[in-house]
Image (cartoon, rainbow, N blue to C red):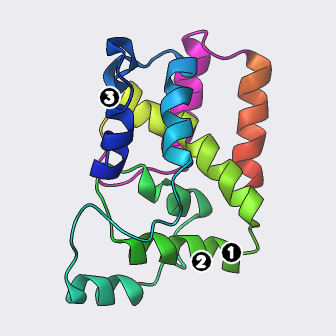
Amino acid sequence: MSRRHKKIAKGNKAPDQNPGSLTDLEKWRKICVRILAEDFPPSSSAIEFSNEELERDANLDVSRMSNWDLVCQEIIDTEFSPVYYKKCYDELLKRGKTLDEIRKMRDFAWMTAGWLNYARMVWDWVSVDETDIRRAIDWQYEGDIISDEQRRSMLLFLEKHR
């Protein structure tokens, strides 16, 4: 989890609320609500980025990334610059995603790929995308955490925003 997200997660004082023990989706949801309440894209970072890094991020071409790849960048256990997150966010807007759709996609990504990466401790530091979201949905269904109806609905949402 990025420093920013770890700080939020640690704000939960109960021992059963730490991310490593959050296979219960309701407990995980509480962490996600706190993460998603933060400004996005963030205007600052706990890490100081050099001017060269910020300039590099400003000039990145994210146009070949999938929608889910763009949304899941904040879930990777790496903290990118605010410029990088803004670049991803702006690309989603450019593709016609509304602010509400992006909010829902982020929520969905945290409840699936975020759950897989942090609550289930898969710890992917390189790439989190639609494959991870599908895997999380499968694990949640196979673990009787979600119903077949929920699984189908989630898969439809995933496809809709592909």
Residue 111 horizontal/vertical position (percent): 56, 34
Secondary structure of the residue carrying numbered label 3: loop
* Inter-mark Cα distance, 3 to 1: 31 Å
Residue 141 horizontal/vertical position (percent): 62, 18
Residue 128 horizontal/vertical position (percent): 43, 50
| Above or below, comparing residue 38 to residue 63 in the picture | above
Secondary structure of the residue carrying numbered label 1: helix
Screen quadrant of the C terminus: bottom right
Sequence order check, earlier mark of 3 and 1: 1
* The image quarter in which residue 66 lies: bottom right
- Decide: marks 2, 3 in contact (CB < 8 A)? no
Residue that mark 2 sits on: 90
Q: Residue at x 44, y 58 (%)?
A: 73
- Decide: marks 1, 2 in contact (CB < 8 A)? yes
Residue that mark 1 sits on: 93
In the image, which residues are magenta? 124-147
* The image quarter in which residue 90 lies: bottom right
Does 53 sit left or right of 82 as displayed?
Answer: left
Magenta segment includes 35: no
Q: Is residue 112 visible?
A: yes
* Inter-mark Cα distance, 1 to 2: 5 Å
Residue 95 horizontal/vertical position (percent): 70, 75
Q: Is residue 162 visible?
A: no
Mark 2 neighbour density, 10 Å: few (under 14) some (14–19) many (20 or more):
some
Q: Which mark is residue 121?
A: 3
Residues 97 and 140: in front is 97
Check disc 1 and give the amino acid type: Leu
